[in-house]
Image: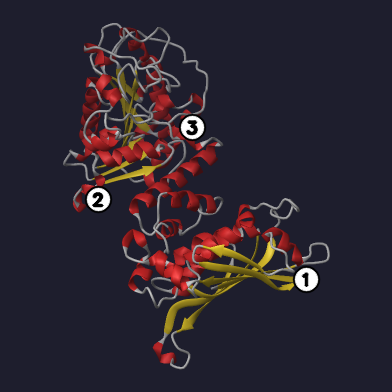
Amino acid sequence: MFVSISTTGTAENPASDLGFLLHKHPDKVQRFATAHGTAHVFYPEAGEQACTAALLLEIDPTALLRQGRGKGRSGSPDLALAQYVNDRPYAASSLLAVALRTVYRSAMKGECAHRPELPGRALPLRIALPAVPVAGGDGPGLVERLFAPLGWQVDARPVPLDESFPEWGDSRYVRLELTGTLRLADALQHLYVLLPVLDGSKHYWVAPDEVDKLLAAGQGWLADHPERALIIRRYLSRRWSLTRLATERLALARLAEADDREAEEIDNAVPDAPETADGTDIADTAEDAATVEEVNAAGPTGPIEVVAGAADGVEGGRECGGPLAAQRRTAILAALGRTGAARVLDLGCGQGELVGALLKEPRVTEVLGVDVSSLALTIAARRLRLDRLPERQARRVKLVQGALTYTDARLKGYDAAVLCEVIEHLDLPRLPALEYAVFGAARPGSVVVTTPNAEYNVRWETLPAGHKRHDDHRFEWSRAEFAAWTEQVAADYGYTVELEPVGPVDPEVGAPTQLAHFRLAEPAATTEPATESVTTRSDAAGPAVTGTPSHDHAPEGSAHR
C-alpha cells in the first residue's frame, strides 16, 4: 500500500520544506508501528526544485487476520468473507487513512513549530496512489465527483482485471493522481476522509466517535461539498443513527458560523433531559408522555409551578403540554382547516407536539417540521416514532434543521405555515429577517402565528411583576402591539390577517395567547389601505395599550414550541 506526496519549489521557497511540514527529515528512512503492520516514510527525491515524500504501508497478514476475525463488530465484511485472500495489503483503504493520521498527525493538524508560517501556505502538490478501490458504479466518475470540488485536478484511470485479457474489462480499482495548489493539511484531511468513502468499507467497527473524527477532518470543506450526504453516509458505514447525528451537527455548525456564535448558544431549545429512577433518559422511555415541565403545567385553572431556569415555567415546558397548549393546538388546527391546507410547515417545531397533531388530520398530506435545535428534532423523531411508521405514513412527515431568520428553498411551495410561540424568542432586530424568510421568500398561502399576550401576565399569580413567562423570551406583546405588527407584516407582504384569542378570555386583559391568521391576499386586495388589512374579532377586544416593548437584545434564542 503506497502513497506519494510531491511538490515543487524555488530558491526562496525550496521544495524540501515539505520535510518541515511532514515532520520527517528527508535524509532519513523512518519506520512507524501501526495496528496492522509497519509504515515506512522515505524521500525518493528532496531538493530545491522538487521533493517527494513516500509512505509505504507494510501490512502484517497475521495482525490483519486477528483484527478482522469474525463478523459484525469484530471486523469489516471484506475481512469476514475473505480472511486469507483479500486486497487490504495492497489497496488504499481505511488502513492507509489511519496510517496517514498516525504518521502525519502534526501535518494534518497544520502544526509546524520550527516554521510556523509554512502550514498556512498553499503548495503545488501532486499525490499519487497506484491502487484505490472504488465501490459501486463508475469508479473514475465517483473519484472526480469527490475530489474535483475541493480544488483537485483528477486523473483516475481504471486498472484492468488482467492486461493480457482486455475483454475481461476493468477492475474496481483506479490509479489515482491528484494535482492542485492547496495547504498540505487540507490535502491530508481530504485523503483521510475520502479514501474510506471510495472503498465503502472500514477495517474497524464504526463507533459514535467517528462522527467527531469526520467533522474535525471535514472542517472548512465538508459542509459545502456537493456530495456531502454521500460522504457522510459512506464514511460512517451507512449507520443511519450516526449519519443523522453528523448531518445535524454539521448543519448546526453552519448556522453558528453564519451567526458568529457558538453552537451551544443556538442548540438551546431543550434543557438537559431529566432521568428516570433507573438512570435512563425520559425522552427514551416516554414517547407519548409529557415532559417534566409539561407535567408541571396546569394552566390558569389549576396549580402553577414556576421552575427557575426552566422553559416557560408559568405555562409549563414549551407551552404545549398543559391545557392552554392543547387549546392553542386546537385553534391552530381550526385555522388551518378553514383554508383546507394539505401541505403544512411547522416552523420552530420543537419536540413535535404540533407535528403529531397535524399527522392525525386526514386532509394533511405533508408536514415539514423545522427547528434550529438538533436535540429537539431528535426528541421529536423519537416521540413521533418516525423509525417505526409505515412507509405511507413516513412519507407524510419530515424533520429538518434550519434557522428561521435565513431564507430556505426547502420551505417554498407549502399551503400553510405555523409559528407557534416562536417570534417572542427572537431579538426584535432579527424579527424582520424572519418576516422576509417566511412571508417574503417561502410565501405560503396562509401563516398562523401565536404568541403570549403580555397583558394577561398579571393573572399568573406566581409570575413576579415585570417578568416574562419564559427566560428566553426577548419580548412579550400586548394585544395592541401584536395587532400593529401583524398589520404591518400583512401590508408589507400582501396578506390579510385575522386576530383571535386563545384560551379563557378575561374581560380586562384578554386571553393568555393571541393568534394571527394571515392569508395571501388576492391581487386586487393588495391595493387596499394598510389599515384595512387587519380584521380583529370582537372577542379579542380589550384595553388599548400603546408603545413598543423595550428589551435588552441578548443573542437570538431558539424557537420553542
| Residues at discs 1 and 3 in contact (Cβ within 8 Å) | no
| Residues at discs 3 and 2 in contact (Cβ within 8 Å) | no
What is the x, y in percent for residue 429? 51, 26
Residue 229 as seen in the image, left or right of residue 102: left
Q: Quadrant of residue 499?
A: top left
Q: Quadrant of the C terminus?
A: top left
Counting residues from the N terminus, which is met first, the one under dot 3 or under dot 2?
A: 3
Dot label at residue 265: 3
Q: Which residue is mark 1?
A: 47
Dot label at residue 395: 2
Instruction: Give the CA separation, mark 2 to mark 1.
Output: 61 Å
Amino acid type at image mark 3? Glu
- Residue at 65% x, 60% y is 184
- Give the secondary structure at mark 2: loop
- Give the secondary structure at mark 1: loop
What is the x, y in percent for residue 403? 44, 38
